Image: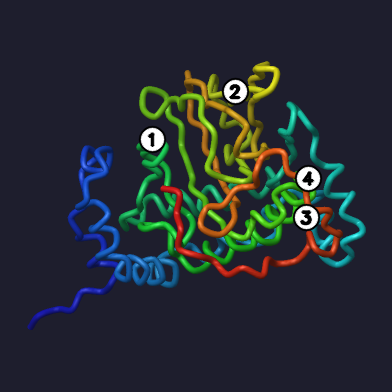
Amino acid sequence: MTMTLTSLERARKVERPTRNAMLERAPSVEHFWNENKNLFASAWKEWEKHTQDESLILDSALYDPLLREAVENAWAKPETEHQVQALWKEVFPNVYKAQFFDTDQLHILRKYLENVENADIPLRPPYGISLNRGGAMLDERSVGYLAAPKFQKFYRDLMGVYMRPISRLLFPDIVGYDSQTFGFSIQWQENKDTKLRPHTDASAVTLNINLNLPGEDFSGSTVSFIDPITRNLKKLSFEPGTALIHHGSVPHASDPIIQGQRHNFVLWLYGENGQLPPHGVTPIQAKPEERWAAPLAKPDRFAPF
């Protein structure tokens, strides 16, 4: 009698592309992800329902309490948005830093992601920037993304409830160029994926959130920012649960990691079909209630990489 394999079992048996094939962007790699898209989505749903630890709840309790309260207040009363803005410190021209996740709760998200890594379901690493072995694509516009339904609910809230209105508040020029989301996770490891050369992002705004736990130290792996006007450079580091937010057009680089590991989410916003705000244009003077509202444009299928 032939046994019918579940989606999870079938996904785990699929032969995966080689590292070299992914690095070379072989056509067979894109075909692999597209061909198995529905299978992997079903496998993640099955994994989350029957295998994943039910105690690992991805909800608003993960956010820093001060940020969570200020954001919730602003959604209820947009005129209180100054409470959100006050939490972000400008640490370099047009680069802001804040405590984003609660360090007492961050272990829940990290344990969830550890379970994802051990699920043995194919995940596409973010090889558009480098073949980062510990990373994954997070947005459904990306092939091979993390399609677990509970994670996707958390990701959509992260982008829509937190990132977009905060970005509009700090960077008024991105309003109208923020309807589309994109995200990936990265894991910098000594002697493996250690650095990223100077570059700009194909985003209107980039949010880079550190996921390291308290006591999970690393050395090196600072993010160097370059002022495009003065050419001044500043190296910025992450503490557990902190985030840096900046225009995608600000040149930056990840310096070599010397010891330990650094875990991060990298999240982008941009306009339809990848549109970015033009340089030198006077920003739209949006009202608070316009910043704290969902965009009218629907998600498109454009993916930067």
Residue 49 appears in which quarter of the rendering? Answer: bottom left
Counting residues from the N terminus, which is met first, the one under dot 1 or under dot 2? 1
Q: Kindly identify the amino acid type of the residue bearing the numbered disc 2.
A: Ser
Marks 4 and 3 in Cβ contact (< 8 Å): no
Residue 239 appears in which quarter of the rendering? Answer: top right
Element at label 3: helix
> Residue beneath label 4, please?
282
Q: Which circle, 4 or 3, is nearer the viewer?
A: 4
Counting residues from the N terminus, which is met first, the one under dot 4 or under dot 1? 1
Counting residues from the N terminus, which is met first, the one under dot 1 or under dot 3? 3
Q: Which mark is residue 116?
A: none
> Residue beneath label 2, please?
224
Q: Nearer the viewer, residue 35 or 66?
A: 35
Residue 289 shows in the view: yes
Q: Kindly identify the amino acid type of the residue bearing the numbered disc 4.
A: Thr
Kindly give the residue lying farthest to the left in the view shown: 1
Counting residues from the N terminus, which is met first, the one under dot 4 or under dot 3? 3
Element at label 2: strand
Q: Nearer the viewer, residue 279 or 63?
A: 279
Residue 216 appears left or right of 194: right
Q: Kindly identify the amino acid type of the residue bearing the numbered disc 1.
A: Ser
Element at label 1: loop
**CA distance separating discs 4 and 1:** 35 Å
> Residue beneath label 3, please?
68
> Residue beneath label 1, please?
130
State the quadrant of the N terminus: bottom left
Residue 73 in the image: state x and y as whole percent: 86, 61
Instruction: Determine whether 161 is above or below 23 in the image.
Output: below
Residue 287 in the image: state x and y as whole percent: 86, 59
Marks 1 and 2 in Cβ contact (< 8 Å): no
Residue 105 appears left or right of 155: right
Element at label 4: loop
